[in-house]
Amino acid sequence: MTAANEFIPSGGQEEAGTELFGIKLTPQVQAIAIAVLGVGVAGYIGYQFVLPEMQKGDEIKQKISAGKQTQLQLQAQIQKKAEAEAKQAEAKQRRANVTAMFASDAGANTLLLDMTQLVNRINAGVVGDEGKAKLTKFEPNLPQTPAPAAAPGAIQIDPDILSDTSFGPSLAGKLRRKKYKVEFEGNFAQTRNFMRNLELMQSLLVVRNLKSELAVSNQAIEVDFLKGKIVPIAPPQTKIKTAFDLHALLPLKQEEKPPTPPSPGAPAAPKPPGTP
């Protein structure tokens, strides 16, 4: 027989017996514990797996940024190299154009023939030797003192290399020069024609120490006696004697040219072993 107030529900023993470390594990407590455990597991997974991957992602981004920066620097260097090569090619073209104006060794050797042909063209149609222009002198102006003999195996210095500053300090040692003594005789029109055509020659020729004077102090005048008067038949042919130094400028020979500096961006020559 059961006394009043002694009935115990079936779930009372379970609630009274479900405890952990003195804490009753009610549904609310269990839910909080599961949530806290889930947060801890998520933090652990994030720390062990997600955080390293994020760090790797940041490192990859930094590498990509550094790679882009390196690529931009390489592109800038390539552009600078291309510009330097273009400037060097332009300088070579200008040098070739200037060098083309210089006389060549073959042209210097045929300079007497060219000037003789020029005089012959001036004399075309002139009757009689008295009225013709003449090239009375053409001789090379050799150096007064010969160059000293070079030692065996040494490079012989070309005496034609321009060593003075008569054409400017910047051209000393960068050109060759051949000098000639020239004398021409003719009237004023012939002399003007000769000097003008001399300037039009393809070779780069420079005239120095130009002197002109009358070839004859008292020149005869052809006259005729008509009706008691002396009448000149023709005006006197005034002969002018012109003398000058002719300089033919030539480029240096290949073995005489200074070494060309390396272009920007070109790889440096390897040093021999043992060189610091």
Image (cartoon, rainbow, N blue to C red):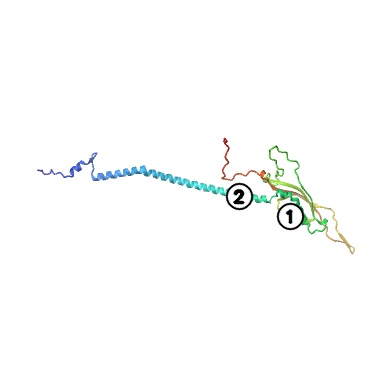
Residue 112: give x, y in percent of width and height: 76, 50
Q: Quadrant of the C terminus?
A: top right
Residue 77: give x, y in percent of width and height: 54, 47
Q: Which one is in front in this view, the residue at disc 2 or the one at disc 1?
A: 2
Q: Earlier in the sequence, mark 2 or mark 1?
A: 2
Instruction: Give the distance between the C-alpha atoms of the residues marked 2 and 1, in whole angstroms.
Output: 34 Å
What residue is shown at x 52% (from left), y 47% (from top)? 74
Residue 132: give x, y in percent of width and height: 80, 56
Q: Mark 2 highlights which residue?
A: 89
Residue 59: give x, y in percent of width and height: 43, 44
Label placed on residue 26: none
Q: Quadrant of the N terminus?
A: top left
Q: Mark 1 highlights which residue?
A: 197
* Residue nearest the observer in this picture, 227 or 72: 72
Helix, strand or loop under label 1: helix
What residue is shown at x 74% (from left), y 55% (from top)? 197
